[in-house]
Image (spheres, rainbow, N blue to C red):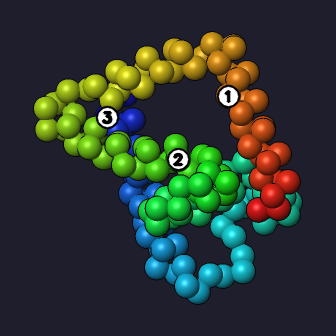
């Protein structure tokens, strides 16, 4: 199970770096469309719409603008910066510290109160994205 998690997270990180890199490369020539399937179908921004823009704004040092675009960008940027080192540490030391923390976090998040708070935060972000007309 641990190997599957490590493979999944590594694949997700690689895809994230490729997508952010592709977006940065095409930043000066943005397309009029979006890759967000939800927004393409409904015309309404999803809770994560603007996350990539927020990550890119963080790389440019525009911290306030990133927060106003989508606060989830901070969380994504944090994981994109820390997880590669954590996974590399586990690979080199043959430990499963990331897997162990993931399992512990799963137990905490499974609490009904924590789930309710997280859902409320995601819904609040979604309403804010719709209000901002992302």
Q: Earlier in the sequence, mark 3 or mark 2?
A: 3
Q: Is residue 97 left or right of residue 33?
A: left
**Which one is nearer the viewer's eye here, 128 or 61?**
61
Please name the residue shown 53% across and 47% down the image: 74
Residue 16 in the image: above or below residue 100: below
Q: Earlier in the sequence, mark 3 or mark 1?
A: 3
**Dot 2 crowding, Cα within 10 Å, few <14, some 14–19, many 20+:** some
Q: Which mark is residue 118?
A: 1
Q: What is the residue that sits farthest to the left in this orientation?
A: 93
Where does the image place residue 75, in percent across and percent down from the top left?
52, 43
State the image quarter where residue 109 is shown. top right
**Dot 3 crowding, Cα within 10 Å, few <14, some 14–19, many 20+:** few
* Residue 7 visible: no
Residue 106 in the image: above or below residue 129: above
Circles 3 and 1 in contact, beta carbons < 8 Å: no
Q: CA distance from mark 3 to mark 1?
A: 27 Å
Residue that badge 2 annotates: 74
Residue 128 in the image: above or below residue 120: below
Q: Nearer the viewer, mark 3 or mark 1?
A: 1
Where does the image place residue 49, in percent across and percent down from the top left?
69, 57
Q: Nearer the viewer, mark 3 or mark 2?
A: 2
Residue that badge 3 annotates: 3
Badge 3 marks a residue whose secondary structure is helix
Where does the image place residue 24, in percent across and percent down from the top left?
48, 74
Q: Nearer the viewer, mark 2 or mark 1?
A: 2
């Amino acid at each position: 199970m641990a190997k599957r998690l490590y493979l999944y997270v590594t694949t997700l990180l690689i895809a994230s770096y490729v997508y952010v890199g592709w977006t940065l490369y095409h930043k000066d020539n943005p397309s009029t469309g979006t890759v967000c399937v939800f927004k393409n179908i409904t015309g309404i921004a999803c809770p994560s719409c603007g996350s990539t823009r927020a990550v890119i704004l963080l790389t440019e040092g525009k911290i306030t603008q990133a927060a106003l675009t989508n606060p989830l960008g901070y969380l994504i940027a944090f994981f994109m910066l820390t997880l590669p080192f954590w996974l590399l540490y586990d690979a080199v030391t043959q430990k499963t510290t990331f897997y162990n923390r993931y399992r512990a976090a799963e137990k905490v998040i499974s609490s009904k109160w924590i789930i309710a708070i997280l859902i409320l935060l995601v819904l609040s972000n979604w309403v804010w994205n719709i209000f901002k007309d992302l």
